Image (tube, grey):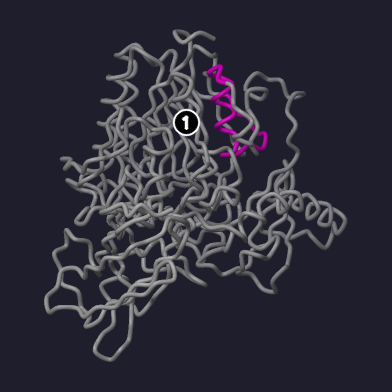
Amino acid sequence: MNAAERPNVILVMTDDQGYGDLGCHGNPNLKTPEIDKLYRESIRFTDFHVSPFCTPTRASLMTGQHAGRTGAYRTTGGLSILFPEKKTIANLFADNGYATGMIGKWHLGDNAPQRPQDKGFQDVVWHRCGGIGQSSDHWGNDYFDDTFERVTPGSRIGKFEEFEGYCTDVFFREAIRFVDQNKEKPFFLYLALNAPHGPYRVPPEWEQPYKDNKEIVNSAFYGMIANIDWNMGVFRKRLDEMGLAENTILIFMTDNGTSGGGKFKGQDSQVLAGYNAGMRGKKSSIYEGGQRVPFFIHWPKGDLTGGKDIDTLAAHLDVLPTLAEMCGVQVPDEYDLDGLSLTPLLKGQQDRWTRDHLVIQHHGGRSFSSPLDEPLADTAVLTEKWRLVNSWRETPRHNFKLYDMEQDFSQANDVSSDHPELVKQLKSLYQPFWESVSPVLLDRVSRIDLGNPDQNPTELCSQDWVMEKGYPPFSFGQIKRLPRVVAPWMVDVKEPGRYRLTLRQWPEEANKPVVAVRAKIEIAGMEKEVPVLDKSMGVVMELDLPAGPTELVTYLYDKKGEAGGAYFTEVEFIENKGGE
């Protein structure tokens, strides 16, 4: 396939929108006419699975690998950061002559070399962390008139820019801008919307139609989806006007189960109110409602139209190899894919399809409720007919439950006692998966560069502290209480020399003083301690650091001698000392 014939690719993924949060999937209250139109015109994978949480889905989507092998399988705690050596779908397409763009939510690392611009995306507009307004995002962002980082082609150093309007409108506007600027060459666009992730905020005109309907659990959540739907219509119209719709592969999917479309008891229950398309569980659940999502693919020139369902088991792992094959791009061996190309299924060649099962594991479970080193904890082993589920929140633990999805789609009736040999067989299918992910999962954490010329100074946030258990402070709601928590950042000093460290409890833009009397840092086997001056906006220390991997721990002591960490710390390389 020559460059002129290669299709464009647009991958749209929403955040926390479940399978049932669409009119075309039977939702009786939510109106999504534009996405419903895409549904009618697309090939739909009706048994498509992702991870139960934001980051691992994005890691698998970008790499084609199980998230446990990528370094990014949790949403915080230093475990939402891709390993530096991991190649992404953007690297692949950029290396093969595509213009690459990423707009919206990344959630695979806020610092070099794990930002989108370090991972193959040339044109980027993005917000940091897992949600707009979370702690590492730009101070003051609240979904309206926000400040995002823009990276222009040819540079990895971004600049913060103020944008006017509601976040979803901004991201679609930027998507249209990217397409217009690259319409004369093949392009790959990853439009990763932050909506309808909480906090649930949307202009009132979108929420108003749902406010008085007592069957709706969260009117703002539905309003956010309605706004996405309207923007999808505008976007598709512009693609058509630019003459690009015919040879553009357009994918619509979501990153996990619903967060606001229904009321549940915990995460694993049947829906108590609202709509969940007959599925059990919500976001973070290993049950079907936590990780089965919509996946629509539309490409007129490739004959992927007409509203056809494919009910074969498929997953986020498969997107990279599928798009590569469709676009005539060879995937190098170093990508070491776990996914399979879906093209045999799209071409009706079922005899070429080789997958007979799929493993989904929520490593650590909800709020680290299960240990990382425990095989099969918070795991589902899936076949076309069966689901073997081990949800760690259920008691007794290791109480494996078996569901016949053909007879019991809502996973209400455990039939494991009727099929003990099948349970044993499905558990055995898990073992190769565990052997693949566990060596990396248990022995390695991704590190953040210090002294990287693509980002100097490096801005560290407590969301990336590596904790022994539980979550670090990752929201301003937690940080404002000044929690007495101390934990390390895993870092890699790239250049030996003099470094300046500035310790704060709030980002610099907040202009808030440090509430402490003493400050201390530990790094590379060294300690340094200084008094905190009254009304200091940041505690500054300098150290000579050797190159190499190490840990950075910060302490801010109050008058009682109790310490919390510096939730925000800038580390700047200032002078080369000529060390090794």
Query: Is residue 323 within the magenta segment?
Result: yes
**Above or below — where is 349 with respect to 367?**
above
User: Which x, y percent locates residue 71?
Assistant: 53, 52
Give the residue displayed 52% in from the left and 63% down from the top: 267
- Residue 440 drawn at (x, y percent): 62, 54
> Which quarter of the rendering shows the N terminus?
top right
Picture coordinates of residue 94, whole percent (x, y): 44, 25
Give the residue type that dot 1 points to: Asn
> Secondary structure beneath disc 1?
helix
Residue range in magenta is 308-329
> How many numbered tags mark residues here?
1
Residue 130 visible? The answer is: no
Q: Nearer the viewer, residue 479 or 491?
A: 491
Identified at 78% across, 55% down, the residue is: 427
Q: Which quarter of the picture shows residue 535? A: bottom left
With 569 as the anchor, is 533 left or right in this view? left
Seen from the viewer's position, the closer of residues 274 and 297 is 297
Outermost residue, bottom side: 560
Q: Is residue 141 left or right of residue 243?
A: left
Q: Residue furthest front?
A: 578
Q: Is residue 575 visible?
A: yes
| Residue 366 located within the stretch drawn in magenta | no
Q: Answer with the quarter of the image where residue 238 lies.
A: top left
- Residue 558 image point, x, y percent: 26, 85
Residue that lies at the very extreme toward the right in this rendered image: 421
Q: Nearer the viewer, residue 277 or 49?
A: 49
**Residues packed near mark 1 inside 10 Å, few (<14), some (14 to 19) or many (20 plus):** many
Asked which quadrant contains residue 479, the reply is bottom left
Left or right of residue 381: residue 304: left
- List the residue tagged with mark 1: 91
